[in-house]
Image (tube, rainbow, N blue to C red):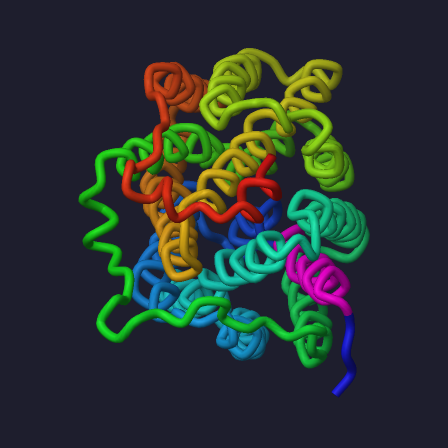
Amino acid sequence: MIKTSPYGWISQYFFSFFFVYGAYLPFWAVWLQSEGISSTDSGIILGLAFATRCVSNLVLTPRIQRVEQYIPVLRWCSVLCAVLIALHGVTEGDFVWIAVATVALNLFFGPIIPVSDALANHYTTLNMLDYGRTRLWGSVAFIVGSSIVGWVVTHWGENWILYCALIGMLVTILLSLRLPGPPPVTQHQPKPGSRVRLAGILKEWPVIKFLFLIACIQGSHAAYYSFSSVYWKSVGYSESVVGYLWSLGVIAEICVFAFSQRFFKSWSVHAMFLLSAVAVIIRWGLMAMTYQIAVLVVIQLFHSLTFAVAHLAAIRYIQQSGSADRMIALQALYNAIPLGAVIAVMTTMSGWGYERWGSYVFLGMAVMGVIALFVRVEYPERTTTEITPEAQKSSG
């Protein structure tokens, strides 16, 4: 079996997977509309996607207790996702069959991000890689994917959204067949019966506050993820321009990931969340009021603050949470609730709101930033003693 470094394996897996995400996230609503699905029904389908990821991350991801399981899980999820993306091509515009295919796809799509993040966190705590500089390759791939798909769709049609996603997932499968060296090994074997359970973690008030805060910030992206492409097309911008706008946002995101240690080493998690909340208010307030290209450029540059800074703050919080099984549990909750359930609900509401109010639906997203200003994140007292020196160093 071909071997590579942990940085090489994870960064390249991030690259190929997020290429697929660059086809899926900005353009799936466009593909749905090309299949004759209305904005309201598109909101329901996209909401089902996020809801399924939520269930998947609550039920499947927490069962992965040992780091040795991470790579086999990523391989099998990639294979099943490729099969299910291909099945979308035979739904023939039928709402029910598209919804069924969406649920099946996202059942296995859901665990990929938390498990790959957990694998990166594992090597980060061992001081074998820098999370920000590893994760940025996913952002680079998102730019490449959204730009290529935007250009291809403009010239060859909406069916190429599916084809590009499928090609990207096949490459992801091939890259996952290698093995990082040294392979991931659980550092501290859990005692029998000591498995971390989500129900127990969800009773901790600091964890509840953390999930609520990140839900407000990341959940505010729901209308953007699902309907910004549709909105920008409706005011006269081509698919290519839409792809470039998405790419610009991710370029700003990459800069934050690349220089996260330099920019935010001395920042507290709370201060990073506060910065993101303020940026949410400004970004979505502007989005609701204008579609002038110069302002859209500024709005997209704010993605570095509304998404990237909040994501780094969340990852830092998780890295400092203690043992590996607790980290994967928090990673699952982070992806299941703020990035799954909340965005599912907000996406469904956004579809309904966009059909009635157009761009003013983004004002609702700005309100979520206002709420986030009043939530202060903190750590459970019992976990502070579990933080390893390596984790403290890697998290800055």
Residue at 65% across, 48% down: 131
Q: Pinpoint residue 338: horizontal percent, then vertical percent.
A: 38, 41
The answer, for residue 164, to whether it is visible in the render is no
Pick the residue in front: 243 or 273: 273
Horizontal side of residue 132 vs 366, given as left or right: right
Per the picture, the main secondary structure of the magenta-coloured stretch is helix
Span highlighted in magenta in the image: 5-23
Q: Is residue 26 above or below residue 76?
A: above
The answer, for residue 325, to whether it is visible in the render is yes
Q: Is residue 137 above or below residue 77?
A: above
Q: Pinpoint residue 353: horizontal percent, then vertical percent.
A: 37, 29
Horizontal side of residue 234 vs 91, given as left or right: right
Image quadrant for the C terminus? top right
Toward which corner of the image does residue 290 lie, by quadrant?
Answer: top right
Toward which corner of the image does residue 20 lie, by quadrant?
Answer: bottom right
Pick the residue in front: 26 or 184: 184
Q: Pinpoint residue 25: horizontal percent, then vertical percent.
A: 57, 48
Residue at 39% across, 69% down: 65
